Amino acid sequence: MKLWDKGFSTDQKIDHFTVGNDRELDLNLAKYDVIASTAHAKMLGKIGLLTDGETTAVVRELDAIGKSIESGSFTIEDSFEDMHSKIEFLLTEKLGDTGKKIHTARSRNDQVLVAMHLYLKEELKEIKQQTKTLFEILVDLAEKNSAVLLPGYTHLQIAMPSSFGLWFSAYAESLIDDLYFVEAAHKIADQNPLGSAAGYGSSFPIDRGFTTRELGFETLKYNVVAAQMGRGKVERATAFGMASLAATLSKLAMDICLYMSQNFDFISFPDELTTGSSIMPHKKNPDVFELVRAKCNKLQGVPNQLTLVINNLPSGYHRDLQLVKEIIVPAIQDMKACLEILAFSLKTVRVNKDILDDPKYDHLFSVDTLNELVQNGMPFRDAYKKMGQEIQAGTFVPKRDIEHSHEGSLGNLCLDEIREKMDKVVS
């Protein structure tokens, strides 16, 4: 069944090429098409294009379809082009001519637009919540290990003392920046495009304000052409939000892979979170974190993929836009999987509490030793020269009883302030 069927069939090769994997992808969106169709049916009843009885019947059957989607029994067979045609078929099968009326005053263009907006709103909300969960784990780890010192590096050279408190909470606060982008994407998605039809509105006296309120959108995408031009744009905004988040997670995963190696030996995980080698019995590989790194690096390319599909398209609908679904839906699934596995794994991380006992880290304390000389009256440049000469001569004695007290330093992590920032983002 095709919603555009005019009584003749297309060549099977054309059908296969144009439909692609839409049926599979639409299983992720069908729930939202039902929700939007329910609001649309109620609106048609409100303006008199459906009778009260017809509205009640359509809403009842849509509710039944929604339950079949929720239970996992809903399918889109090869005889149907997409979720829209299958849902309309089920309505017509149950209600006859009444079911055929559901497509009044809308197009597949605004159908898929509103379903995608609803889908992205919910997925972005879930991504925000998963990020908040990971954030809380990181802040708790920072608090628990605030006094455990860790080498800080610049250029991968030993630099200055850090701490696990700083390391964990650095990633926690970085997640807040990422959620600013995610929140921006949510704001773009939170606009109702339903009623734009094929991109030029409708001669029916539809009530777009009603469907906006019914579907829980913050506002309406007023201009019908602008609504259609949002196709691909809202997906790209979502991809930018996820790319920012993925960059943070990829960097964290890279740190973990380094810190787990025997050369560093800063952290470890239970054996069941690592994998082995087919020939080397001693191996405990960080495969989980390597895959997080790789998946998140792929996610950072998604905005560019979407740009290459939608770039330079003129206004109006074009079939190119169908391809954005096959880019954004798997990307969202990968994003959520990475957040979930990191939260699961980091709960079990074990930190090495005696890292800086190794003499090779003595030079970490050169800056603090230099600063003490300055505080005792020596000019900074003279103190710097003195430290350099002692290090060169091998006579340097580190000052290990360091004190860092300013906001955000290892002695003053400002975890409460960081938590407050996160609460404002997710509230």
Image (tube, grey):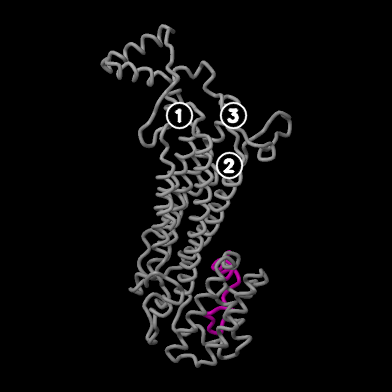
Location of mark 2 (residue):
346
In the rendered image, residue 230, in percent from the top left (x then y), is placed at: 39, 66
What's the distance in space between the residues labelled 3 and 1, CA to CA?
Answer: 19 Å
Q: Residue at x 27, y 16 (%)?
A: 377
Indicate left or right for 111 with 281 as reference. Answer: left
Location of mark 3 (residue):
261
Q: Is residue 93 magenta?
A: no
Q: Is residue 4 magenta?
A: yes
Q: Residue at x 51, y 17 (%)?
A: 360
- Amino acid type at image mark 2: Leu
Mark 2 neighbour density, 10 Å: few (under 14) some (14–19) many (20 or more): some
Q: Which residues are magenta?
A: 1-21
Question: Looking at the image, is mark 3 or mark 1 earlier in the sequence?
Answer: 1
In the rendered view of the protein, which quadrant contains the C terminus? Answer: bottom left
Quadrant in the rendering for residue 85: bottom right
What's the distance in space between the residues labelled 1 and 2, CA to CA?
Answer: 19 Å
Q: For the residues carrying marks 3 and 2, which lies nearer the camera in this image?
A: 2
In the structure shown, which secondary structural element does the residue marked by tag 3 occupy? Answer: loop
What's the distance in space between the residues labelled 3 and 2, CA to CA?
Answer: 16 Å
In the structure shown, which secondary structural element does the residue marked by tag 1 occupy? Answer: strand
Q: Would you place residue 211 above or below residue 286 in this image?
A: below
Location of mark 1 (residue):
162
In the rendered image, residue 202, in percent from the top left (x then y), is placed at: 38, 83
- Amino acid type at image mark 3: Ser
In the structure shown, which secondary structural element does the residue marked by tag 2 occupy? Answer: helix
Q: For the residues carrying marks 3 and 1, which lies nearer the camera in this image?
A: 1
Mark 1 neighbour density, 10 Å: few (under 14) some (14–19) many (20 or more): many
Question: Looking at the image, is mark 1 or mark 2 earlier in the sequence?
Answer: 1
Viewer can see residue 9:
no
In the rendered image, residue 288, in percent from the top left (x then y), is placed at: 61, 42
Quadrant in the rendering for residue 67: bottom right
